[in-house]
Structures are given as C-alpha cells and as structure tokens.
Amino acid sequence: MPTTWNVGNHRVHLHAGSITEVEADAIVTAANAQLAGGGGVDGAVHRAAGPELLRACQAIAADARGHRCPTGQARITPGFRLAPWVIHAVGPIYDAARPDRSAAALAAAYDTSLFLADLKMCASVAFPAISAGVYGYPLPEAATIAVDRVVRFLERDTCVADVTFALFGEASFSTFEQALTKRLG
C-alpha cells in the first residue's frame, strides 16, 4: 500500500508517529474549546512549540464559558519552535445519539483548518486524527470524514500542496490508509 496519494497536483501523505516529527508550514492540533493545551496530541504540540504557544492561545478572546474556539471551528496562532503556524481545531466529542451532528462538526473542523492554512499561504499542513482519541469518535468514521474533507479541498485551487496525516499506532495508520485507498484508489 502507498503512503502517498496524488490529488491532481497535490499530495496526501501518511506518517506513522508524532505530528511534532512532521515538517509543515502549519501543524493542526486537536484542541479543546478553551485552547488551554492538554494531553495527547495537543500536549505534544504545546511542548514542542514552547510556552509561547499557550500565551498566544490565551490572547484569543474567550466567551463567558472560557471558550476561545467553538466546536467545529479552528483558530490559528504562530507555531513558535514547532512550525510557522499552529492551527487549533476543536473537534466534537462523539455523540452516538446524534452521529450526523458529530459528523458535521468534525467536517467543519477540518474545513476551517484548511481554510486558515490556505489564508496564510501554507504549502504544507499536518493533521492528527481529530476527535478520534479521548473524544471517542469511531476511528473508521473519523478517517472517512478527514480524508473526504482534505481531498475535496485539494481538488480546488489552493496553495496547500501537501497534507500529511500523522497517526499514532498501527490501527490508526491502517484505518487512514484504507480510507485513502477507498477514496483515491
């Protein structure tokens, strides 16, 4: 199976390992609505970028609940020691009673992230499997949505030339590999 797929003049890559190992113009992190850092991918991104990243997040205006970014959206900050930019994408906590609502929010988180990367003229973007960890999104559905949104975006006129999915564990890697093979052949 390949680890790179072509979408016109653009490419989608799979990387087995930490997103902090990927060289990209924009690194997307699976953030919480407070943009307060945390564990998992977000913790690794914050550690790699340095304490300036948390300060940049804290400079974003918060609502009455302390949320700096609503679910299904993203915010962009400088990436400091990690990359030129970090995009903080807030995916949904999976709701089995309302899977359509969860799917729409997850798709919107990818769409907004890609829009911000394009706005900042990023040629390369790295994504984790947003919401597929502690937020409980079933991995096959999360991979299908992620691949679909990225491929649709790359089929347009965009300066984003390369998208990498950085995945931890064999199950995540093979699930995204299957989703890409199904979508792109």
Image: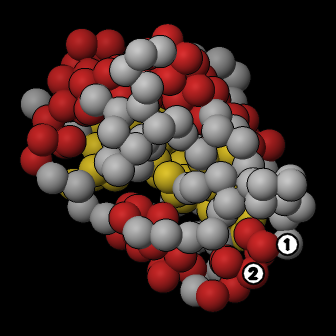
Q: Residue at x 49, y 69 (%)?
A: 38
In the picture, residue 152 is in which quadrant? top right
Structural distance between the alpha carbons of marks 2 and 1: 6 Å
Q: Residues within 10 Å of mark 1 (few under 14, many from 20)?
A: few
Q: Residues within 10 Å of mark 2 (few under 14, many from 20)?
A: few
Q: Is residue 114 visible?
A: no
Q: Say whether residue 33 is left or right of residue 173.
A: right
Tag 2 secondary structure: helix
Instruction: Give how far across and how far down residue 179 sits, in percent.
Output: 26, 22
Determine whether label 2 and label 1 are within 8 Å by CB. yes
Instruction: Give how far across and how far down residue 44 sits, in percent.
Output: 42, 73
Q: Is residue 96 above or below residue 176?
A: above
Q: Residue at x 63, y 69 (%)?
A: 36
In the picture, residue 108 is in which quadrant? top right
Q: Is residue 171 visible?
A: yes
Is the N terminus in the top left, top right, bottom left or bottom right quadrant?
top left
Tag 1 secondary structure: loop
Q: Which mark is residue 55?
A: 2
